[in-house]
Image (cartoon, coloured by chain):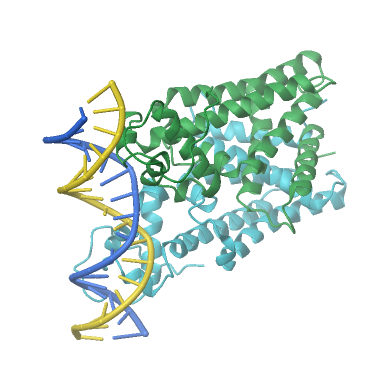
Chain colours: A green, B cyan, C blue, D yellow
Amino acid sequence: MSFPMASRSRKPPPRGYHHGDLKNALRDAASALIAERGVESVSLREISQAAGVSHTAAYRHYADKQALLAAIAEEGFRQLADINRRTIAETPGGPVPQLMACGRAYVRFGVQRPHVLQLMFSQAIPDWSAHPSLQQASETLAQTLAGVVAAGQAQGTMQPAPLGEMTLTAWSLVHGLAMLLVGRRIPAPAIDDAFVEHMAAQCVALLMRGLAR
Amino acid sequence: MSFPMASRSRKPPPRGYHHGDLKNALRDAASALIAERGVESVSLREISQAAGVSHTAAYRHYADKQALLAAIAEEGFRQLADINRRTIAETPGGPVPQLMACGRAYVRFGVQRPHVLQLMFSQAIPDWSAHPSLQQASETLAQTLAGVVAAGQAQGTMQPAPLGEMTLTAWSLVHGLAMLLVGRRIPAPAIDDAFVEHMAAQCVALLMRGLAR
DNA sequence: ACCTGAACACCGTTCAAGT
DNA sequence: ACCTGAACACCGTTCAAGT
């Protein structure tokens, strides 16, 4: 959970000693640059400059570049889990419409913040075991999904398959859809908001009802 | 389609002029290195060295590093489309079991060649419009899937939803599952071959029958 | 036509030194 | 405690020069 600090401007402030919370300032600067152009094209030196410090200052607060990226990915997982929780709370009709709404929200999050979603699952952070809090945030996300599925099973409105398999199926569908959309890997006429919302709704509905008949 | 050339050894051969097919030799060297350690940790200079040429020789055959990576991704899409075609031909019982078998094969491909799957969908090649043959190979893959779905609809064993939506739903599920497995992003006890096969089979079966009941 | 080697403008990371 | 600046071992890419 980040404090509502004013996000630093991108032009380097005068220079000299940084006042206080350089750790969060670096994370905010990195987050803004990545949201604009993606992880692949942002360097630690550029992030440091945006935060107004020398290109080695970050090592006082993060073990390396990967650790800084992991912090941003973790933020993304937390936000996505929050969106899930809100969606569940605000969607009437029980587990089935709730799971469908969560699926659409997942895809919406990805399309609205493509570079963050890509970072969250990119090989820029190959070894998650070195970042336990990131791992934790991701598991929290998975558990919000599992909670809805378990409720649906208890209610008898979802298939009584093993919880892990049901959850992974739902997650895989929306994750795959989001990644294909965000990476512009699907052959489609135009990928605007209306198209995305429509496609997410249809895919999620098809998952619930099944492709076969 | 690549010629069955002997793949070059990784230790740099004597040096000097390269005999003949440096373009393919570079692609083979790159492919081998990427399969071992992933795109993120392979440099063009290292690839050139593995192929036994200077670190600038590649520019005679590829516009830049991205173009070389695109060639490898394209190879991956072609192989995956081939696997799909073979799977369809070899699976009895019509479109429904064929689509399910294709889905399992997609996940299997990803788990067997994780770094190739990741390259195929990575932002290492952000702009596909600059690589039309890569785009084409990806569309061919999508069309083999669409063909099975269309056959199922004609037969009346699959939902009569729009073909594009049905195909994208199927693709998204297996793509998402493969990416989550390969990236080790799912909380699971052990991700061995048996686990993967079981999970792929269950997820694909759940997609066909639907999560709701 | 095909390849090399020097050169350029970058990287991430380390480390001694400054305040 | 926190940050800087020089230094190291790398990158991708260009370009004149060699065969």
**Residue sitting at x 73%, y 43%:** B169
Q: Nearer the viewer, residue B55 or A207?
A: B55
**Residue drawn at (63%, 47%) of the image:** A182
Q: Quadrant of residue A150?
A: top right
Left or right position of B26 against A111? left
The location of residue B70, given as percent across then percent down, is 49, 61
Asked if residue B143 lies left or right of residue B5, the reply is right
Closer to the camera, B167 or B102?
B167
Residue B28 spot, x, y in % from top left: 39, 62
Quadrant (top left, top right, bottom left, bottom right) of the N terminus of chain A: top right
Tell me, yes or no, if residue B174 can be seen here.
no
Query: Taking the image as drawn, is residue B22 in sight?
Result: yes
Closer to us: B63 or B77: B63
The quadrant in which residue A77 appears is top right
Which residue is most to the top? A154
Number of dots carrying numbers: 0
Position above or below: B184 against D14: above
Asked if B95 appears above or below B60 in the picture, the reply is above
In x, y percent, where is residue B160? 87, 46
Q: Within the image, what quadrant is residue B204 found in?
A: top right
Q: Nearer the viewer, residue B58 or A19?
A: A19
| Quadrant containing the C terminus of chain A in the rendered view | top right
Residue drawn at (41%, 57%) of the image? B31
Q: Position of residue B62 (x, y in %)?
A: 42, 70
> Looking at the image, is D13 positioned above or below residue A171?
below
